[in-house]
Amino acid sequence: MLLASNMSGMTQMNAETAEAVKSGFLAAVPFARTLGVTFSDLDHGHAVMRLPDNADHHNHIGGPHAGAMFTLAESASGAIIISTFSDQFERAVPLAVSAEIHYLHVAMGDVTADAELGRGRDEIVAELDEGKRPEFPVEIELRTDDGTVTGRMSIIWTLRPGRR
């Protein structure tokens, strides 16, 4: 799913860096740990995370609660932000601006979120260099193990210039 043009100038993330981002993310986001969210894949501009089936997180029809699926998708987008822009965090704060989710089919069992950065990193950083507050989408597809797409989410992120 990752478009090569979105990551111009970036090399593939090495395994050590990917593991550091994964463990750092899970340490920093207790709710993701509570849900049992795990990483399947991580690279600059792309993340795949998994929500295991757990009866404690089910809704009234026996599938994962909509809030758990939202958290899974938002977590995958956040992992992209960390893996792609962590070198900018001394001068900008990443913030989610808005999110829109569409639930397409009832999900049963484990759910996977496959997230992709929607604009090129170089373009986003160039806006930050110009003193602007860049906004950019992360697109996420939610699916079950049989490949059924159960939802789609779009999150608009920004890098707000200045420190926290």
Image (tube, grey):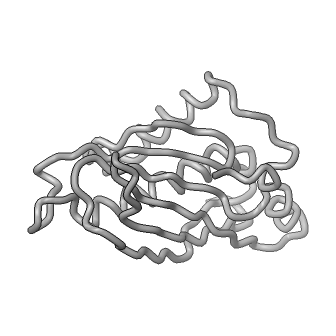
The residue that appears at 11% across and 51% down in the rendered structure is 56
- Horizontally, residue 79 falls left or right of residue 144, namely right
- Which residue is rendered at x = 85% and y = 70% of the image? 131
Q: Is residue 38 left or right of residue 62?
A: right
Q: Residue furthest top?
A: 16
Count of marks placed on residues: 0
29 up-or-down from 95: above or below:
above
Q: Residue at x 25, y 45 (%)?
A: 34
* 142 and 18: which is toward the camera: 142
> Which part of the image, by quadrant, shows the C terminus?
bottom right
Between 117 and 128, the one lying in front of the other is 117
Residue 3, x across and y down, in percent: 74, 53
Q: Position of residue 127 (x, y in %)?
A: 85, 68
Considering depth in this image, is 88 or 112 the residue closer to the camera?
112
Q: Residue 49, percent across and down?
A: 44, 45
> At 36% across and 64% down in the image, what residue appears?
150
State left or right for residue 146 relative to residue 130: left
Q: Is residue 64 above or below residue 82?
A: below
The front one of 50 and 127 is 50
Snapshot quadrant of residue 42? top right
Is 96 positioned to the left or the right of 128 in the image? Answer: left
